[in-house]
Image: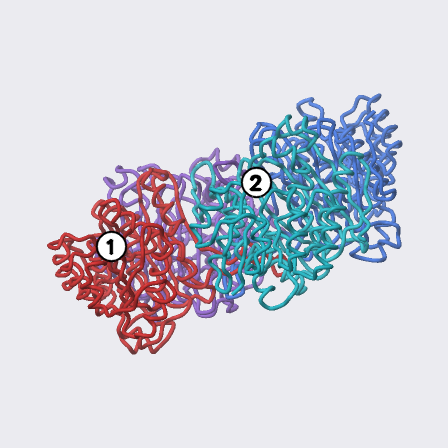
Chain colours: A cyan, B purple, C red, D blue
């Protein structure tokens, strides 16, 4: 039985904690949060114990740590947990600074502990199935990857200001999907960003609408577009054009109901946001982490995956500012 | 070059006439109509000559007759044309009385001329493709045929009164499709009819909403439903459930445009009515008639197809009135 | 906290039991099964106690009984539980004999306990949403209800022989949906049944492919078709044609992945069978039962709903045998 | 009656010629082609006269010229026709050199004759409807335009070599659609091109797979992707994300037939190529030209539209070569 400690009992922490709780072979034994009451409440729901993050990290009884606290605590917590010999699952990103990410990964490497980064979309059943078929050759060689990703509504400006910007905060998921699907590292990045949704986001120095295109060494191409607003719900679509065909995966609608009137045929809106859309992905992601730990395999996506997506986000951020293409070096 | 005379220059007559005019190897040479001006106008458009129907039937210059006049003139015109040795294309039905249809077919048989009945749906590209795949075994043995057919709006009551009733006037097309798809004759018919759309239709002794189910000798089943009103356009769908899968063909939308908003994803309404939906079917139907005449083949659907669909309509009319199932005898 | 006892720890019993276990405000305290080991295993998983059904029915500690045992035990268990003053949730059907159902409902009525029948499809999110919009007038007056329902593969003949026949065993769900959607009782029933899937089913005196049509007193119409085999998965679709438009709800596909090649655009098959397709429906159904008990409301669908669907199944069985329409009397 | 002369009786010339022939109010009177027999054959089909292009340009009897000859003759023919006072419809592009295009437009301007450029996609019923709804505010302000465009198979390398390259030959249509949909001029262009489909195309100095992104002065964004090969047919899709929703329009499938088996639900492939997909667009395009001439309105898309799309193609060609973004100046 793998014993887990959860650090951070907010929205996403409670999802991962509940998934551990529900999984045979895994047990949530400890919960920490800056807000002690939140930790206690969630501990009560899951039969765990509320304790400080230090206590969790020092407990010889705990095998694995779930890091779901604010971004600026991630790198330090990962390093501490690694030094304590614990397996780590950390929500993206490891840190807003790629250099700091690199340092942290060295600590993890030295400690020899497993580290998994929370790129949940890889585990979405439709995206995972598309990826599996792609690797099995269903459309031959990958040529163009197209990713459309839109949030229903922008977060508060206070969040934006600490987020690292759209490319690091939102498009990072798409960069990870791009790498996952291309099967090759992008080496050239071009980006445009605009502030079309909320002028306050522009004032805060960020963009809310952006497009990126990338090229790999062998010439495979990728386009990504993001908007912080979609009136019609959480829009998450990918498409892969290959030498032998095309694969795509799209949105989940709330129901299958269709209404036909003189105005046309209307289908339900898509699911609201990531908690609904990716509920199953979060469950499968945690399961993959537990399975990797149980089976002694290296969990994936790895810390390196986290670093490389981050570097693409850095490059896009730079390109959107300078108006110039940016070349990626991987080492 | 096959020379055609058109009798009846109304809406459907002009469609067939224009299709002859546009077809290489066929020529529209004469047009008749009770309304002489209508005949003259359409003759002018197509380079044909306006003349009486008698003159058309007697002209030694004309090879084939298109009968698009009112229903109560069909049987007499077919017989006269057959005796004059002309090939005949006649809009459905031959006559509202199956006995009269039988007599007419005997005249045609004796004269040895080709006769084709205008069951246009068999030529709809989607329905024709479905039929072709069905016969090629794409879904194995046919087990259940489902036909949904709805007009956008009811015709005037004056039309209803002379129409022979919903089963003979509207559902006759579905009976023909049922026979076409089942590949076997239905032997038992059950029907329910209601007047839900327009009380005046009920007062006129007809129904405007109806369901029918049929069984063939080997046990294949078919369900048909009709409504004289569909707010969302002309609804024409068929579905065939077989031992190895299911084939279906549906409506054509006006465009491919989709609008996504908070209210959902809305697709354009379906095409308005039969002139739009079946424009291509009419073209292909006429082409099949010309090809059959040119190649010396028997045109299909034949007069017997017309008679058998009519008998199913008779049976459904009787079943809807008596509340009892009706058995069909084919001879 | 409502305390539940489960009688029958087979496939469907374990689903309901797990849904009780997961629901705040409800607790599974006891499990019975003819197979004691099955009861013990499921009790261990859910923290309940394995005991005999008699013990459960006599326990003063238990508020509500879930009856998931074989059909021929339902009526007796409902009556015993009712006399013991317990709320009852029973899988359909109460009994294969409508007369026996009637007697049982009288016992429940006399005891004044709540009874809910497991017509799970009413709780499918898409079907429930369609029903809600229908009642809110989204398509005006209901005119034609069309229900297509196909199982992926037939059950063993041994099951068929004890099932009461296709109309009572499989189409009963569609009869319930028909009543639910029509909003009016059907009064006339016509049926055809065939044995096309498995000759052994025909030898056992049952059919495996069937169509039914029904009419209500006001003339609303309904068509249902069933097959015991669908190579493409569990096919469950409903469509309601009304005076102001059409509502329909269809199948859930396994993923949203689409593959485009020269062979066309291929979408994933539909979900395999009822355990996948209706997993959410089962969860919501049990929740509705718990809510009704907690709030003092009468649970729905009621015993009367069970009886009336059964009578439609009886009528269809009779019509399919005699070839004649059957009139329903409701009292 | 407007009298037309056609220069170039190849594939596209015959389409435009037939559309003139079929249109009331317009008449095809003369046909020229380097291949005299081709001109004679098409003239015979349409009741026109075969003559030299010089004779057509000098004929006082001809009101309008359709230029469908090879690209390198366009500019000269437009200028000659303009000086002769004739209205001109010219297939894209006016010339592969934007400078030459500019000169030609000055000649047209000086002559004061109407000039329309054959950007047929603007007239596709679905794209035109999308554009109309966009301008009517259906999705608020335009924010991101996404255009996916793939040919079924690459043209011969001999064609590629004289084509001006993918951006000027193929993506030019998408640049025109981008301008049409954005409602604002792009000012910054970034491009990547690869040779993934056919190495011979790369050897010829061209690319066969490309992505472009553009930004307007107000920050609206656009992404385009092209491939010279799509195994699944002619892929032509556009999508506009706006402040109040999303509009998209997609491919036309050959039929509506769907086949469901254990392998999934398969829809027909999309229509083969531009002659099928855009048949209706060509008809409407020619009609718009005739209507503009008849009504004295300026035809659209204009010569300026041709020039501006060309400049975007030039910029993309340069960016794909240099790896750097290119700024567009409009004057």
Question: Total marks drawn?
Answer: 2
Q: Whole-Å distance between the Cαs marked 2 and 1?
A: 45 Å
Between D120 and D202, the one lying in front of the other is: D202
Q: Who's the residue at 19% across and 54% down the image?
A: C304
- Circle 1 marks a residue in which chain? C
Q: Is residue A12 above or below residue A19?
A: above
Tag of residue B257: 2
Dot 2 and dot 1 residues touching (CB under 8 Å): no
- Residue A172 in percent (x, y) is at 67, 45
Q: Find numbered disc 2 in the image and state the secondary structure of the residue it sits on.
A: loop
Q: Which residue is mark 1?
A: C116
Q: Is residue B63 visible?
A: no
- Residue B98 in percent (x, y) is at 31, 57
Q: Who's the residue at 25% across and 66% down the image?
A: C320
Disc 1: CA contacts within 10 A as few (<14), some (14-19) or many (>=20): many
Between A143 and B136, the one lying in front of the other is: A143
- Residue A101 in percent (x, y) is at 72, 48
Between A222 and A14, the one lying in front of the other is: A14
């Amino acid at each position: 039985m793998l014993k887990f400690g959860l650090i951070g009992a907010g929205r996403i922490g409670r999802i991962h904690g509940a998934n551990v709780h529900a999984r045979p072979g895994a047990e949530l034994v400890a919960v920490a949060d800056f807000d002690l009451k939140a930790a206690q409440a969630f501990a009560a729901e899951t039969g765990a114990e509320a304790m400080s993050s230090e206590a969790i990290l020092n407990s010889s009884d705990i095998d694995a740590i779930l890091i779901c606290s604010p971004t600026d605590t991630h790198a330090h917590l990962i390093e501490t947990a690694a030094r304590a010999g614990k397996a780590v699952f950390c929500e993206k990103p490891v840190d807003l600074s790629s250099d700091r990410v690199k340092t942290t990964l060295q600590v993890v490497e030295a400690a020899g502990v497993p580290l998994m980064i929370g790129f949940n979309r890889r585990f979405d059943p439709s995206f995972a199935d598309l990826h599996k078929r792609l690797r099995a050759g269903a459309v031959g060689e990958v040529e163009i990857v197209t990713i459309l990703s839109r949030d229903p509504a922008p977060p508060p400006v206070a969040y934006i200001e600490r987020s690292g910007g759209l490319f690091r905060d939102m498009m990072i998921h798409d960069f990870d999907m791009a790498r996952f699907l291309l099967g090759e590292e992008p080496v050239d990045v071009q980006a445009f960003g605009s502030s079309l949704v909320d002028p306050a986001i522009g004032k805060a120095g960020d963009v809310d609408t952006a497009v990126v295109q990338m090229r790999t060494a062998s010439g495979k191409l990728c386009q990504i577009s993001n908007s912080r607003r979609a009136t019609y719900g959480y829009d998450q679509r990918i498409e892969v054009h290959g030498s032998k065909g095309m694969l795509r995966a799209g949105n989940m609608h709330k129901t299958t109901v269709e209404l036909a009137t003189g105005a046309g045929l209307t289908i339900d809106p898509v699911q609201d946001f990531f908690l609904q859309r990716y509920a199953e992905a979060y469950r499968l992601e945690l399961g993959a982490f537990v399975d990797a730990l149980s089976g002694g395999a290296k969990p994936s996506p790895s810390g390196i995956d986290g670093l490389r997506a981050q570097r693409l986000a850095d490059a896009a951020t730079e390109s959107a500012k300078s108006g110039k293409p940016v070349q990626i070096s991987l080492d």
